[in-house]
Amino acid sequence: MIPSASTLAFVESPVQLLNVLEWAHARRADDGPARADDAAAREAAGRLLDGVPRQPGRSTARAAGDHTADRAGGSRTPSGSGASGPQAPTIVVLPPTDPMSRGQLRRVAGLARDEGYTVHWQEARGGAGAPFKALAALAADVRRAERIVVGDPFSRFVQLLLAPARAAELVVVDDGTATMEFVAQLGRGERLRRWHRTGAGAGARVREFAYAPVSGTARRRLTPGGDRRRVEVFTSMPVTPLPGMEVRLNDFAWTRSRFGPPRLTRGTDLVGTSLVETGVVDPVRYRAAVLALTREHGATRYFAHRRESPEKLRALSEATGLEIVRPDLPLELIARRGPVGRTIVSFPSTVVHTLPYALIGSGVTVAVCEVDPAWLTAAASPRARGFLAGVTETARDVRRLPAQTARAAG
């Protein structure tokens, strides 16, 4: 049972949960003095973050959070710094099924509880009846909520939850670069669809047709001014607000107040992406690109995306000699705490927008390597090339690697 709350936040990934904490921190700062230097919260967060897993050598590291992925569920009252007031959300975690994401979610949920938030763990996947049970469990709370915060407006489950919503205010926090596409699609009046989805196949088209009424309702709910509803987007991404939409900057003030500054190593760290797993980039081309970047920049570590497969990471390690690190927290927290390389190199992804904020004043240089169009698979969405280029071109305070770096890897 979820305690009665005027603000409900629904998150499905560790990054979404982190950004809910950032949003709440920003709103508290607007309403009064933020408790940024609360010693108890800082100490509790430091204890929770101890032991970030790293496995030396060429084998793939396992996240320490995995073995606790299915413990400590449900709601509990925290004993940390406390988060109160009308802006304080009750956070509902709708976990995916993969162990890496679940492990990271458990860890960030622990941070949220230590900050004083109520966190409710609601299984909505993993079985044919799970979504319906979750909807039945949450519907009444959704109808009562005055404010709803969501991390992924493209999520079909979140769209289903928005159908009975009567909230006067909807807030969308970052789920990465997808926020850019969300605002653009909303502005064009298009149906909400992830940029890397092709929609090919008769089965996919039938499912989309059947789901269209729900998707359309969610789009209207998320459109500013509809039914006198206020819509806010809390983001680190470069987006142009629609008429009536408020855009609030996420500069990772909570993360910077709690952790760091990081200790810097002399090496370079690479950041992995799930572009291979989503069918956008050819795996052979990706491996060659990582090898080229490793040689050119003297990289020693590779921070894996939580969706990267063990087989792919094993092949990367064997080909490059990189130490594979599987973080059990979002990279913004890992990097802020350190140790971290003086240079962080990434392909076009969320972190080229978020890390410059999280690492303000740390002396770390974030660099982005463009994706050569030749790396794209035949199955990649027609939007892929333009979207990835936009992610690179709009990143602030980053070093853009020369184009020949990308071509040399092809």
Image (cartoon, rainbow, N blue to C red):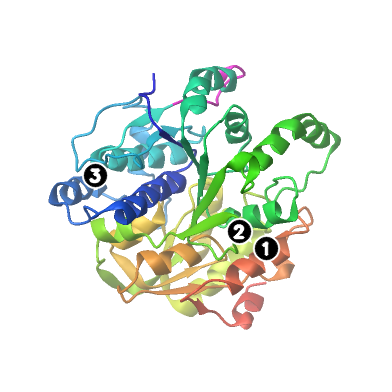
Which region is colored magenta? 122-130
Residue 387's tag is 1
Residue depicted at 58% across the width and 72% down the height = 394
Q: Earlier in the sequence, mark 1 or mark 2?
A: 2
Residue in front for this viewpoint, 255 or 285: 255
Q: Amino acid at mark 3?
A: Leu
How would you classify the magenta stretch by its main secondary structure? loop
Question: Is 267 situated above or below 175?
Answer: below
Q: Which residue is mark 3?
A: 48
Question: Is 242 situated above or below 13?
Answer: below
Q: Marks 3 and 2: which is nearer the front?
A: 2
Q: Secondary structure at mark 2?
A: helix
Q: Earlier in the sequence, mark 3 or mark 2?
A: 3
Residue depicted at 58% across the width and 35% down the height = 158
Q: Earlier in the sequence, mark 1 or mark 3?
A: 3
Q: Residues within 10 Å of mark 2 (few under 14, many from 20)?
A: many
Q: Secondary structure at mark 1?
A: helix
Specify the farthest residue to the front.
Answer: 228
Q: Amino acid at mark 2?
A: Met
Residue in front for this viewpoint, 387 or 21: 21
Q: Amino acid at mark 1?
A: Phe
Q: Residues within 10 Å of mark 1 (few under 14, many from 20)?
A: some
The image quarter in which residue 337 lies = bottom left
Q: Marks 1 and 3: which is nearer the front?
A: 1
Question: Is 260 situated above or below 394?
Answer: above
Q: Secondary structure at mark 3?
A: helix
Specify the farthest residue to the right.
Answer: 202
Would you say the residues marked 1 and 2 are in contact, meaning their CB atoms lie under 8 Å apart? yes
What separation in Å lies between label 1 and label 2 (alpha carbons)?
9 Å
Residue 180's tag is 2
